[in-house]
């Protein structure tokens, strides 16, 4: 049985991410989303521990969700998960 803090929602939202002061950047597809984090499919490589800026674009509007800092928790193949950094 999974023991997660937050319920995950299956989505398919475009995303863009980058790391300040680094060449790490890319586009991806957010495949699940929760108040605490998300899982992204991307051809760009990231590593656990990378801190990223993340833009998530909803398909049904021009609005975007901007997260100033998320941390990559794991990366396997063409997918990775990141969590929000609390302030």
Image: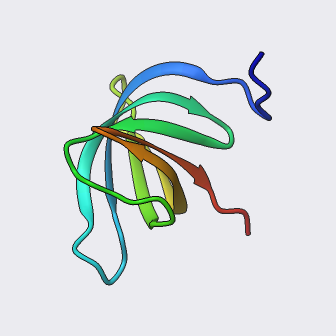
- Residue 13, by quadrant, is top left
| Colour scheme shown | rainbow
Query: Measuring 74% from the left and 21% from the top, which residue is drawn there?
Result: 2
How many numbered dots are placed on residues in this image?
0
Vertical position of residue 12 compared to residue 50: above or below: above
Going by the image, does 55 lie left or right of 65? left
Going by the image, does 69 lie left or right of 18? right
Vertical position of residue 30 compared to residue 54: above or below: above
Judged from this view, the residue extending furthest toward the bottom is 21
Going by the image, does 27 lie left or right of 71? left
Quadrant placement of the N terminus: top right
Query: Measuring 36% from the left and 78% from the top, which residue is drawn there?
Result: 20
Q: Nearer the viewer, residue 25 or 64?
A: 25
Going by the image, does 55 lie left or right of 37? left
Query: Measuring 36% from the left and 22% from the top, which residue is drawn there?
Result: 60
Q: Position of residue 74 (x, y in %)?
A: 49, 48
Vertical position of residue 44 compared to residue 34: above or below: below
Query: Measuring 43% from the left and 63% from the top, which residue is drawn there?
Result: 53
- Residue 33, by quadrant, is top right
Quadrant placement of the C terminus: bottom right
- Residue 85, by quadrant, is bottom right
Vertical position of residue 1 compared to residue 76: above or below: above
Q: Position of residue 70 (x, y in %)?
A: 54, 59
Q: Position of residue 14 (x, y in %)?
A: 31, 35
């Amino acid at each position: 049985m999974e023991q997660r803090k937050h319920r995950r929602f299956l989505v398919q939202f475009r995303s863009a991410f980058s790391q300040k002061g680094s060449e790490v950047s890319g586009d991806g597809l957010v495949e699940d989303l929760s108040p605490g984090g998300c899982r992204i499919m991307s051809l760009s490589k990231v590593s656990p521990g990378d801190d990223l800026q993340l833009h998530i674009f909803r398909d049904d509007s021009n609005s975007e969700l901007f997260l100033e800092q998320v941390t990559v928790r794991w990366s396997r193949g063409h997918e990775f998960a990141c969590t929000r950094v609390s302030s």
